[in-house]
Structures are given as C-alpha cells and as structure tokens.
Amino acid sequence: MQELNPCPCGYLTHDQHPCTCTPTQIQRYRYRISGPLLDRIDLHIEVPSVPYEELKKARSSMDSGEMKASINRARQIQEKRYQDLPFLTNSQLSGKWLSEFCSLGQEEHAFLEVAVQRLALSARAHTRILRLARTVADLEGQEHISTAHLSEAINYRSLDRQDY
C-alpha cells in the first residue's frame, strides 16, 4: 500500500490547516509519480482527517464483523462465478473474460465513455474501473454492473481526476 499526500505540505484538502504550496509545487509533486505507475494502482482514496468530536460519536455504520461478512459473500460470488476458470477474483479479469464478466448495458457504456473522455483515462485505468465496478456490484449482491457501481469505482480513482 502506498500513501501519498495531496501536496508537499500535506494540507491541500485539509479544512483546518491552510496549504502553503504553490500550484507549481503541487504539480511538480504530483508528477513525481508517473501516470503509468498510477494506472497500476487500483484504488486512489483520499482519507481526510477526522475531528475529535466525530471520533467520539457512536457509529451507526457497518461494523467490522458486518464488513467481513459482506466481503466473504462477495468472495463466494466470485468463487462460484469463476469455479471452472483459471482465476479466482475480479482483479484477475482481462481480455475476453473482462468483456464477459464486466459486460455493460447501453446506459452504462455511455456513462463510462463520458467518464473516460472527460478524465482522459488510459486503457489500463478503464480496465481497473471495470474490475472495481464488478467488485462493487458483487459486494451489493448484484449480477449486473450499474452506473452507480461505475461511478463508485471511478470515485475510488481520485488521482485520475485532477480535481485539486
């Protein structure tokens, strides 16, 4: 797992500390990691700092036991889907298998096409988004990939989106 700050000082997206970096410094910092290397990283997720008040509140979201059960269900779906094939998980899909198991409807193709064009995504990023969307659908127990699954997968690739 690789960690990367959003800028040299680390405060570009922080809501309580001002960033001291210039746009040029941020751009130079970002270019230290090449596009082809970023393409090989499945998830780019920003993890913001959490205020103490939020940390001490009771959680109402999924606990680790529920999360583990959800992941195990998704793994079982993949195990069953790929039982007679030479791979075990969505992360191993490529070529014809990617087309077969990550097939999209017309609406989903149109959505992904717009995203690929607007974000200038590479073919490798496109493939990773499809694999990730397949996994998101599996986590929800859905047979087909929807635009919501694609959108979530795209959001997990924040460094492809130059939105800083």
Image (cartoon, helix red, strand yellow):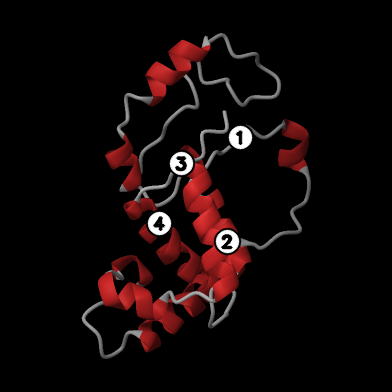
Q: Quadrant of the C terminus?
A: top right
| Gap in angstroms between the C-alphas marked 3 and 1 | 18 Å
Residue on which the image places disc 1: 48
Q: What x and y, as percent, mark residue 109?
A: 52, 67
Q: Secondary structure at mark 4?
A: helix
Instruction: Please name the residue shown 56% across and 68% down the image.
Output: 108
User: Comparing marks 3 and 2, which lies closer to the viewer?
Assistant: 2
- Mark 1 is on which residue type? Pro
Q: Is residue 27 left or right of residue 20?
A: left
Rounded to the nearest angstrom, the CA distance separating label 4 from label 1 is 26 Å
- Element type where label 2 sits in the image: helix
Residues at marks 3 and 1 touching, judged by CB atoms closer than 8 Å: no
Q: Name the residue at 45% across, 83% down.
A: 77
| Dot in front, 4 or 1 | 4
Q: Is residue 100 visible?
A: yes
Q: Sort mark 1 into few (<14), some (14-19) or many (20+) by Cα contacts within 10 Å.
A: few
Check disc 4 and give the amino acid type.
Answer: His
Asked if disc 3 and disc 2 are in contact, CB closer than 8 Å, the reply is no
- In the rendered image, residue 27, in percent from the top left (x then y), is placed at 43, 19
Q: Earlier in the sequence, mark 2 or mark 4?
A: 2
Label 4 – label 3 distance at C-alpha:
11 Å
Residue placed at 54% from the left, 79% from the top?
144
Q: Residues within 10 Å of mark 2 (few under 14, many from 20)?
A: some
Q: CA distance from mark 3 to mark 2?
A: 16 Å
Q: Could you say where residue 53 lies in the image, as x and y percent from the top left? A: 78, 35
Residue type (three-letter) at the residue carrying disc 3: Asp
Tag 3 residue: 160
Which amino acid, by three-letter code, is at mark 2? Phe
Side (left or right) of 69 relative to 85: right
In the rendered image, which residue does mark 2 sit on?
111
